[in-house]
Amino acid sequence: MVALFHLKIGAGVLPAIQHGYLFVDLFFVLSGFVIARAYADRLRTGTELRAFPVRRWGRVFPLLFVSSVLFVVARNAAVAAKLVGAATATPGASPRSCSGP
């Protein structure tokens, strides 16, 4: 529904798509209930409760770290390619076209 909302597909067919952005909130609410239900029995003691965020961070952080590094590398490569393209362009030519007059 969220994708259809952003792509503006089927808004006239299904009224729910007009409010597709609300499905993000619904997803997080339902996820909270599922996680709470799944971990309710495991988090009864203080030791388990303290270990939970550490384990959770250990699962989430590697993906966050790798994604961030890949983004920075890709962004820097794009900027470097743009700078190299501008440096090799002929004087007086538009930076968007290297074909000349």
Image (cartoon, grey):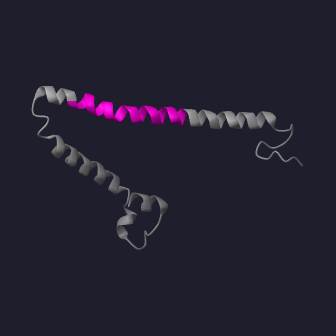
Residue 80 figure quarter: top right
Task: Give the residue displayed 77% in from the left and 42% down from the top.
Answer: 95
State the extent of the magenta-drawn residues as a range: 52-72
> x, y percentage for residue 8?
47, 64
Above-or-below relation of 35 to 18 = above
Residue 90 figure quarter: top right
Name the quarter where the N terminus is drawn. Answer: bottom left
Secondary structure of the magenta portion, mostly?
Answer: helix
Q: Nearer the viewer, residue 4 or 72?
A: 72
Q: Is residue 79 magenta?
A: no
Outermost residue on the right side: it is 101
Answer left or right for 85 relative to 72: right
> x, y percentage for residue 74?
58, 37
Q: Nearer the viewer, residue 12 or 51?
A: 51
Task: Give the residue displayed 37% in from the left and 32% down from the top.
Answer: 61
> x, y percentage for residue 22?
34, 56
Q: Is residue 55 magenta?
A: yes
Task: Give the residue displayed 30% in from the left and 52% down from the top.
Answer: 27
> x, y percentage for residue 9?
46, 67
Task: Give the residue displayed 25% in from the left and 30% down from the top.
Answer: 53
Above-or-below relation of 78 to 10 = above
Answer left or right for 17 relative to 54: right
Q: Say how many tags the image has.
A: 0
Answer left or right for 81 relative to 47: right
